[in-house]
Image: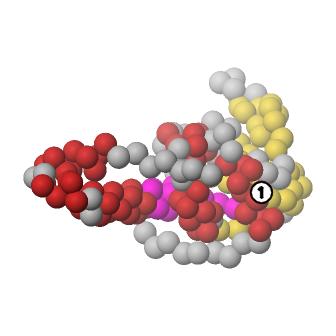
Amino acid sequence: VEIQDIPKSRSTRNVIHKAFKGCILFDDMDNETVEQLIDTMEMRTEPSGVEVVTQGDTDSPDMFVIERGQVAVFITDKEGQTRRVNEQGPGTRFGDLAFMYYCARSSTVKVEQAATMWVLQRKVYNRVNVLHAEQVQRRKEELVANVPVFKMLDAAHRQTIVEALIPVTFQ
């Protein structure tokens, strides 16, 4: 998976941050990782009337953040009746349930007012998480290796300490 940085304005980054708040996908991430994910998000613009997500679709691995415009959310019940259940605008996200759980889309989302959205691809999200975890692991190992009192321990005991370390950020 190739990870590309796509430039964004400060206001765009703020909209994406707002949309990420309260989403379990990002709650436990450090700021550096969240910023890296934001860097990778691709812009998508759609005119009114375009169906962005289709209920039942199982091959739709993206999550969306709306920067401008508005979308409407529809659910079709078992009898085939479609009803409008929500509308979303700037600073909101959609598609995160299917993104997280690898499940079929639970609703259809259509653009109501021409929309600018930012797309986070699941494969990029997963790759950034793996790279970040590897980086954190290396930092912990370096830290433990550089503490004089730990040098007398064998590799297995040093690894136990590495695994027990939890990053804490102070402000």
Q: Nearer the viewer, residue 50 or 138?
A: 138
Residue located at (25% from left, 46% from top): 161
Q: Position of residue 106 (x, y in %)?
A: 63, 36
Instruction: Please provide percent x and percent y for residue 135.
Output: 38, 63
Between residues 15 and 1, which one lies in front from this camera angle?
15
Instruction: Determine whether, in the image, residue 12 is placed left or right of residue 138.
Output: right
- Mark 1: few/some/many CA within 10 Å (<14, 14-19, 20+): some
Callout 1 amino acid: Val
- Magenta run includes residue 47: no
Q: Position of residue 54 (x, y in %)?
A: 66, 46
- What's drawn in magenta, residue-wise? 118-129
Colouring scheme applied when the structure was drawn: secondary structure
Which residue, as the protein is rendered here, is positioned at the far top?
79
Q: Main secondary structure of the magenta part?
A: helix
Quadrant occupied by the N terminus? bottom left
Residue 123 belongs to magenta span: yes
Residue corresponding to mark 1: 15
Residue lying at the far right of the rendered structure: 113
Res 136 visible: yes
Q: Residue at horizontal 72%, vertical 72%?
A: 8
Q: Which residue occupies 69% across, 26% down?
A: 77
SS label for mark 1: helix
Q: Residue at x 74, y 50 (%)?
A: 18
